[in-house]
């Protein structure tokens, strides 16, 4: 497997990062789903994937820690975790909460260091997405007030050897632009696939700043697969039948009314 450097860091990672969102039971039980997930994770690491993504929100770290904690290559792996402070409905940055999420990940994953902390500043997105146009979007107005204590606590954790690099998950191009210009982040994590290409506008500036980029949701939450790309053939109870995905299917039809269902993810 050919590895690549994550931005201007010393991290050499596999081009594919293993996501752990839905690969195991959230109840912490070794059922058929979890057994299959464990086999998939073991085979991925055996094949050379050394980049693992997780979050306490997924409720699957019980299996990730168990599988990787006894794997022969466990010391060669790089972990990236989501840390969401502030969260929905909690408008301020809280250092103990941020540190606690990192400490919990170290314990659950049975590692001494988290390679990349993916920071999420959650909040109201309506103005950023253009739903209303009056005034500066609230999250953008809070950027400096959130980033300053974030960097202070992150640097303490880094000095303790518990974390390596900080990445932003901006949600919107406007917030991503602010994050890139700030010079505070080593990289960015964002949705990126054939239907979600907005962050490409930031690639030149990110390259100039030496930032890494990690694209998640490569097949648009499962839409760009043989199972779901043809909406007419979806079961009535499939989640992609929901009206919230109308925009994606309309966009897909605009690109190609007779779309080829064989997508290549890179």
Image (cartoon, rainbow, N blue to C red):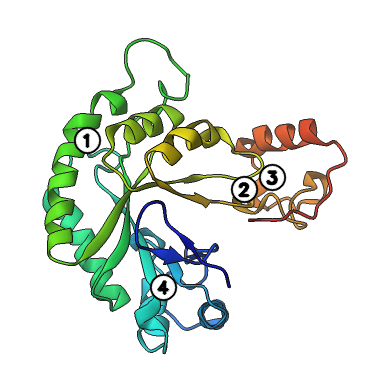
Spatial CA span between label 4 and label 1: 30 Å
Q: Which residue is mark 2?
A: 220
Picture coordinates of residue 16 (x, y %)? 55, 63
Q: Which residue is mark 1?
A: 91
- Which residue is tagged 3? 241
Sooner in the amino-acid sequence: mark 4 or mark 2: 4
Query: Is the residue marked by circle 3 packed among few (<14), some (14-19), or many (20+) residues within 10 Å?
Result: some
Image quadrant of residue 160? bottom left
Callout 4 touching callout 2 (CB < 8 Å): no
The span from disc 1 to disc 3 (Cα, nearest Å) is 33 Å
- Identify which residue is drawn at 20% across, 66% down: 162
> How far across and down, in percent of the image, does residue 30 sit?
47, 83
Inter-mark Cα distance, 3 to 4 = 27 Å
Q: Nearer the viewer, mark 4 or mark 1?
A: 1
* Residue at disc 2, secondary structure: helix
Residue that appears at 32% across and 16% down: 136
Q: Is residue 233 visible?
A: yes
In the drawing, does residue 217 fall left or right of residue 263?
left
**Residue 92 visible in the snapshot:** no
Residue to which mark 4 is pinned: 27
Determine the CA span between mark 2 and mark 1. Answer: 29 Å
Q: In whole angstroms, how far apart are the C-alphas of marks 4 and 2? A: 26 Å
Whole-angstrom CA distance, mark 3 to mark 2, is 14 Å
Mark 1, Cα crowd under 10 Å, few <14 / some 14-19 / many 20+, is some
């Amino acid at each position: 497997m050919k590895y690549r450097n994550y931005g201007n860091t010393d991290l050499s990672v596999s081009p594919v990062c293993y996501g752990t969102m839905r690969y195991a039971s959230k109840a912490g039980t070794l059922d058929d789903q979890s057994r299959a997930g464990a086999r998939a994770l073991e085979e991925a690491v055996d094949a050379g994937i050394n980049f693992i993504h997780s979050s306490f929100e997924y409720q699957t770290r019980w299996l990730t820690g168990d599988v990787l904690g006894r794997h022969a290559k466990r010391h060669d792996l790089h972990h990236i975790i989501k840390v969401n402070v502030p969260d929905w409905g909690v408008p301020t940055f809280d250092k103990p909460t941020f540190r606690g999420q990192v400490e919990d990940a170290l314990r659950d994953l049975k590692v001494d260091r988290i390679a990349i902390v993916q920071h999420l500043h959650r909040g109201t997105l309506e103005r950023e997405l253009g739903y209303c146009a009056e005034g500066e979007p609230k999250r953008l107005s809070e950027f400096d007030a959130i980033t300053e204590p974030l960097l202070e606590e992150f640097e303490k954790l880094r000095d303790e050897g518990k974390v390596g690099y900080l990445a932003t998950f901006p949600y919107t191009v406007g917030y991503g632009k602010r994050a890139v210009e700030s010079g505070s982040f080593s990289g960015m994590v964002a949705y990126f696939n054939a239907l979600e290409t907005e962050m490409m506008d930031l690639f030149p500036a990110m390259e100039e700043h030496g930032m890494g980029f990690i694209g998640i949701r490569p097949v648009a939450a499962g839409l760009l697969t043989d199972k779901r790309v043809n909406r007419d053939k979806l079961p009535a109870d499939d989640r992609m039948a929901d009206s919230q995905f109308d925009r994606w299917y309309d966009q897909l039809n605009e690109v190609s009314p007779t779309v080829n269902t064989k997508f290549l993810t890179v």
